[in-house]
Amino acid sequence: MNGGRNRTDDENRKRREFLKNAWAEEGLNLAFEGEEVRPQGKMGNSIDAQRLIMLARRQGKEDGMIEAIYSANHVNNECLSDFTVLLRCAEEAGVTGAIELLNSDEGKAEHAAKVRHYQQMGINSVPVIVIDDKYPINGAPDKELLADVFNQLLDGKTPTLR
């Protein structure tokens, strides 16, 4: 067993394989390679990337920023703690004020509070989808599960997360 929520190494490998295949079905290349289907991207702290996403959200450019960041890290294997990479992502998304944000403490306290909030919900790994800031779905759920959860919510029910 390892840190993947008490899953075996084989279960974790299968989850990574599922995620890579799900990306491929959408025409995306997730750089998970080798027998273990492990990420090949350069690791780094993503706090600054998250802060840039918050800035982009305020400018109405969140989707473009997320796309640029995901492509940089998961497709091009670039490190998200490299300001050069982050500034290029901001430029691609049309986000202004990125260098000023990165050279400040803006958004750090807000980010830390969000991390604490999600940890209190029991979230300690990614990917995870949080619906209505209450219902976490760990991993890369299939479309049927998401449709079921949203239908339950639309019917006024508390969703059953299988």
Image (cartoon, rainbow, N blue to C red):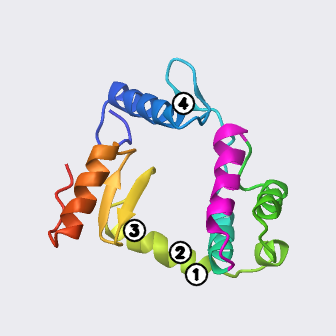
Residue position marked by numbered label 1 in the rendering: 109
Chain-order first, disc 2 or disc 4:
4
SS for callout 4: strand
Q: Quadrant of residue 34?
A: top right
Query: Can you name the residue that lies furthest to the top here?
Result: 35
- Give the image location of residue 156, x and y in percent: 16, 73
Chain-order first, disc 1 or disc 4:
4
Residue position marked by numbered label 4 in the rendering: 38
- Give the image location of residue 86, x and y in percent: 77, 59
Residue position marked by numbered label 3 in the rendering: 118
* Three-letter amino acid code of the residue under disc 1: Ala
* Three-letter amino acid code of the residue under disc 3: Tyr
* Magenta region, residue range: 59-77
29, above or below 93, in the image: above
Residue position marked by numbered label 2 in the rendering: 112
* Three-letter amino acid code of the residue under disc 2: Ala
